[in-house]
Image: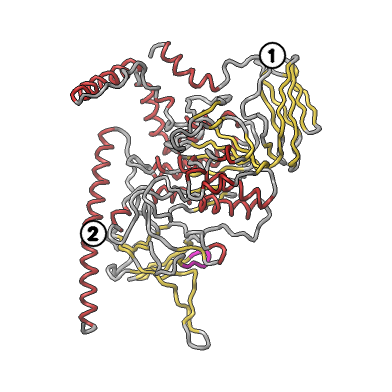
Amino acid sequence: MTATIIAAIGSLCMTAAGAEKTGLYTPHIFSDYMVIQRDRPIRVWGSAEANAETRVQFAGQDMTVQADEAGNWLAELEPMPVNAEPQTLTISSGGETISYKEILIGDVWVLSGQSNMEHNIANVYHGDAETASANYPNIRLMTIPHMACPEPLEDFERHEDYDSWAERGARGELKGAWSPCTPASTYHFSAIGYVFGRRVHTASGVPIGLIDASWGGTTLEAWLRIDALEAIPLAEPFLQMWRERIEEYDPEENLKMKIERWEQDTERRKERGEQPRPKPTDPDPSPAFNRGGPGAAFNGMVAPYANFNIKGTLFNHGFNNALGDSRPKLYAEAFKGLIVNWREVFRDEEMPFGIVELTAGGQPQTHENFEERMVDAAPYIREGQAMAWRALPNVGFASAYDQQVNWYHPQKKFELGERIARWGLGEFYDQEHIGWQPADCIEWELAGDHAVVKFDRPVLVNDGRPFEGFAVAGEDRHFYPASAEYVKIGKDDRGRDQIDKAQLKVSSPFVKEVHAVRYAWGRNPLGNVVNDKHHERTIPLVLFRTDDWEYPEAPYGHEAYMEHRGVLHRLRQQAIAWARERRLQEARLILEEAKADGN
């Protein structure tokens, strides 16, 4: 790689890191209208002349610190309680002064993950009415510019950026600066994050700062710090794959290949009488700057404000780790690692972390395609997210599988924002009466031709129909759609059946010996089970399985990966054949029942 190209690519990160800064400087996380985290030390940092004294004044506190030899300084003021009265932060050094006004003290939440977290409020269902009424001066919004880098950045850019979710012709969004919540500033903002912030603010009165650090198309591994990934043994082949990609990258060869493809495309266009596209003049960026690479999104979109204290995080993710190269075991380990890692980064071992699971999308599961839709990495990725929720303290969980829409960016964001807001209100804003915990399978018993599954709380259906979404399999691992009914536990004094609404009997007439039960097992699955408690009937049962039959983990290397694709194809073909066979079995059963009834 030539020095010129290295410099050009590297400047993408160096500019964001503030490489040109001189004199007194503070990172862009500081601006007018910011929110500072209550009840935590107030950390203010930046750079000045080497060894220069820097004075920081805020809300009656006054501290002077000395910059080090490189000019870096950090002041840590005393924690302060909630304050909705605007304050001014003043920083001075060497005759220079920087002031930031309209600052509130409240709770700061970071919103991260993929495009379903990034998806803006204006484009979701009811988004037009919500943006029109989004006048909350004590909610403050910031969107972090997209940036992937191989090394942690010190700062991010501040610029007007076009929002890919907005309709063509819409104005851009100012990224990298705080803004009060208004219809204009809300228009481009994360829908899930905004609904969460609006709900907890209006219920608690606490000023809320929302930092949207989400980016569509990112892998989970991109959001972990590199050393956290290196601590996960299952991640070593992944890391080695990316090391090799980066080492083998040749920008001159890359540009040559781009030009060859352009020449081929130009010939085809000439044959059709079309104008050629512009000839490529630059190579693609090095894989070191790929948004899916290890640590890349963390380095560009989290590391720059790691000194900042926050209340907690909301994370909606999974799509790019549920594709053909999915590795659910690695994902499960990495997701737990991400939570632990971010808690270390933000200096809070029990920092609240709210999980919004992988959103539904793609062809909905039906009775006809039931088996085929179960052959998918998505439920295993959701399972990994639920495992992190169960394993770690102070973690919230909101299911998102129940939307039954065929687009991977479903417009039903209000439901998800409200579900995770219930966790926030119930756990951190003195609203203990608001339940958020989803029903979870805690025990099961395989009993011949049926299974009994037990939940940690009573359940019911959300639509008045029979229970849907359950599947049972025998030793052959053919999962059939299953019926479910409450377990009967006796009779009352009038001879009526008594039921246990926290236990279901699950069975299929075609499985004589049940070996496994699954629920909501598909990318866009059937499933209508929710909490029984009245105000919690929008909270879905968490997907589960009783077996340990694993999904084929994608291998590394082209040839092995192509073989893996063949394995998945054969599994889907087997599932299609099973579904065909099952429908014939169902037809025979109907005929037999009709014959028995004398029809």
Residue ID for mark 2: 578
Of residues 329 and 64, the one drawn nearer to the viewer in this rendering: 64
Which span is picked out in magenta? 455-460
User: Please, what secondary structure does the residue beneath circle 1 have?
Assistant: loop
Task: Tell me where residue 286 sits by quadrant.
Answer: top left
Query: Would you say residue 597 sits in the magenta stretch?
Result: no
In this image, 297 relative to 84: left or right?
Answer: left
Q: Residues within 10 Å of mark 1 (few under 14, many from 20)?
A: some
Quick one: which residue is furthest to the left in this view?
271
Residue 580, horizontal then vertical, whole percent: 21, 60
Classify residue 291 as left or right of residue 355.
left
Residue at 43% from the left image edge and 15% from the top image edge: 6
Residue 318: horizontal and vertical position, in percent?
Answer: 43, 44
* Three-letter amino acid code at the position of disc 1: Ala
Whole-angstrom CA distance, mark 2 to mark 1, is 72 Å
Q: Which residue is mark 1?
A: 50
Quadrant the C terminus occupies: bottom left
Q: Work out whether residue 218 or residue 342 is closer to the camera in this orientation and state it.
A: 218
Residue positioned 57% across, 57% down in the render: 436
Q: Secondary structure at mark 2?
A: helix
